[in-house]
Image (cartoon, rainbow, N blue to C red):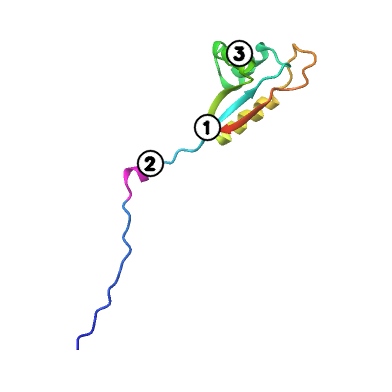
Amino acid sequence: MEEETPTIVRPTRKRKTDQDRRPQRQPRYHVILWNDDDHTYEYVVKMLRELFGHQMEHGFQLAEEVDGRGRAIILTTTKEHAELKCEQIHAYGRDPMIKVCSGSMSSTIEPES
């Protein structure tokens, strides 16, 4: 009588494709600037220039959007960078041109859809 040879099953290796080798892109987040009545357009434009490097014209367009829509996306970036930019907005300080202004503008982050 012949003895049966046991079958050895070896796991197959999945070959990496070019798609598997590509670096994964980090999720993106929007930095949202919220409207209020305690800050002037000049303040918003200056802040956007200093913190985000926006040109004056683009800063003014964003200030108009915040004023008209109640909010504006001012940057889309990684979560860590978005959180940093929110902190910088909140630390920017009050608008000296408005006496009742008690502090910085409000901002939040939200995932890009």
Q: Which residue is mark 3?
A: 64
| Disc 2 versus disc 1: nearer the observer | 1
Instruction: Classify residue 99 as left or right of residue 111.
Output: right
56 or 61: which is nearer to us? 61
Q: Circle 2 — which element?
A: loop
* Residue located 59% across and 28% down the image: 31
Q: Which residue is mark 2?
A: 22
How dense is the environment of label 2, judged by Cα within 10 Å: few (below 14), some, or many (20 and up)? Answer: few
Q: Circle 1 — which element?
A: loop
Which numbered disc flags the more N-terminal residue, 2 or 1? Answer: 2
**x, y percent for residue 27:** 50, 37
The stretch in magenta equals 16-20
Q: Are marks 3 and 2 in contact (CB under 8 Å)?
A: no
* Residue located 29% across and 72% down the image: 8
Asked which quadrant contains residue 35, the reply is top right
Q: Which residue is mark 1?
A: 112
Majority secondary structure in the magenta region? helix
Marks 3 and 1 sit apart, C-alpha to C-alpha, by 22 Å
Residue placed farthest to the right in the image? 100
Going by the numbered disc 1, the residue's amino acid type is Glu
Circle on res. 20: none
Relative to 86, say whether 24 is above or below. Answer: below
